């Protein structure tokens, strides 16, 4: 029986700490840390994510703004919204929800956010710093996973770490953070040959594929730590991860459930990055 890594509980503890530091920040600076979330278009999943981000901000005492723009907005109009937010003294973090509608280049938009307000850590400068191991914001999902491992006392040092998925948001930065923690890291993806041979070596396996129950028990080593980043609907419409939880749980030493694992940590780390941005700007 695996230890279930409870993302909700770790998230609660971390948010309590953020709340306390937020009160101290308000006391010292006479204003709350502020996050602006820009959402373009009507993507239903994005609407939910953005609502949850704003709610989380309010719960810890942040100032929160959601800027809703129509899908037809031009690149210049969106850039001028970012310009205004850059100059707004109430705003410490700026986040543009992805994906953007067709016709808007996310690279151009993200790189218009000043790196010190880029609380997603998607700006090319922050991506470069992550690669170099320099101090900067860490992308929220990989940062949340590192926090969970740390909370559980799971050391990465010298471990075989396998990341399945190579996205810019999760897979690549995850591999870097594990590498900086002295893991031996392999990234697998859709062209990987003999995937099972590689995943079976993992002491720590991170699944960020986007396919329901993709990681099956035969792909997992006995005693492995399993981190499931997936948020999929299974054949019955039920929320499921990238891991076949029911069967993999029997072999793992520790595992994150879906829901209630990595998911809650992502928004928590967004709060942490926003507070850091505010603290850095008031130094
Ligand atoms: N879309 C899905 N995940 C994310 C995220 O972490 N940040 C932003 N900005 N958009 C997303």
Image (cartoon, grey):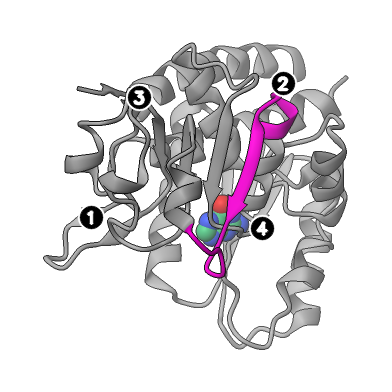
Does residue 179 show up magenta in the picture? Answer: yes
Residue 239 has which mark?
1
Q: Tell me the CA gap for discs 3 and 2.
A: 50 Å
Query: Which callout, 4 or 2, points to the residue nearer the camera?
Result: 4
**Horizontal side, residue 119 vs residue 65: left or right:** right
Q: Tell me the CA gap for discs 1 and 2.
A: 42 Å
User: Residue 265, how many percent across, how many down?
Assistant: 46, 34
Q: Are marks 4 and 2 in contact (CB under 8 Å)?
A: no
Q: Which mark is first along the chain, 2 or 1?
A: 2
* Viewer-nearest residue: 261 or 206: 206
Q: Tell me the CA gap for discs 3 and 1.
A: 25 Å
Q: Which mark is first along the chain, 3 or 4?
A: 4
Disc 2 Cβ-to-ligand 1 distance below 8 Å: no
* Viewer-nearest residue: 132 or 88: 132
Residue 270 has which mark?
none
Binning the other alpha carbons within 10 Å of mark 3 as few (below 14), some (14 to 19) or many (20 upward) gives some
Secondary structure under the numbered disc 2 in the rendered image = loop
**Horizontal side, residue 87 vs residue 110: left or right:** right
Q: Tell me the CA gap for discs 4 and 3.
A: 29 Å
Residue 30 has which mark?
2
Residue 223 has which mark?
3
Magenta stretch, residue numbers: 178-194
Q: Which mark is first along the chain, 2 or 3?
A: 2
Q: Are marks 4 and 1 in contact (CB under 8 Å)?
A: no
Q: Which quadrant of the figure contains the C terminus?
A: top right
* Viewer-nearest residue: 213 or 223: 223
**Horizontal side, residue 222 vs residue 274: left or right:** left
Q: Are marks 3 and 1 in contact (CB under 8 Å)?
A: no
Q: Tell me the CA gap for discs 4 and 2.
A: 37 Å
Residue 224, by quadrant, is top left
């Amino acid at each position: 029986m695996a230890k279930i890594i409870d993302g909700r509980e770790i998230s609660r503890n971390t948010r309590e700490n953020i709340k306390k530091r937020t009160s101290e920040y308000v006391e010292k600076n006479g204003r709350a840390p502020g996050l602006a979330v820009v959402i373009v278009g009507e993507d239903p999943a994005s609407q939910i994510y953005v609502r949850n981000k704003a709610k989380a901000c309010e719960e810890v005492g942040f100032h929160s703004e959601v800027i809703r723009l129509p899908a037809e907005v031009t690149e210049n109009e969106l850039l001028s919204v970012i310009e205004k937010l850059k100059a707004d003294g109430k705003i410490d973090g700026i986040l543009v929800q992805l994906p953007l509608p067709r016709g808007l280049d996310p690279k151009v938009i993200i790189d218009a956010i000043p790196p010190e307000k880029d609380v997603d850590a998607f700006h090319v400068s922050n991506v470069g710093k992550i690669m170099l191991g320099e101090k900067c914001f860490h992308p929220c999902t990989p940062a949340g996973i590192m926090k969970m491992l740390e909370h559980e006392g799971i050391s990465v040092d010298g471990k075989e770490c396998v990341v399945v998925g190579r996205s810019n948001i999760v897979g690549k930065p995850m591999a870097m953070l594990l590498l900086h923690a002295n893991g031996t890291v392999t990234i697998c993806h859709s062209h990987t040959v003999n995937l099972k041979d590689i995943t079976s070596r993992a002491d720590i396996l991170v699944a960020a594929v986007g396919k329901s129950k993709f990681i099956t028990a035969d792909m997992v080593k006995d005693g492995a730590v399993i981190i499931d980043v997936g948020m999929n609907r299974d054949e019955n419409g039920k929320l499921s991860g990238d891991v076949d939880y029911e069967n993999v749980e029997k072999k793992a030493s520790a595992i994150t459930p879906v829901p209630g694992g990595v998911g809650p940590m992502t928004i928590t780390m967004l709060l942490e990055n926003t507070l850091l941005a505010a603290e850095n700007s008031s130094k």
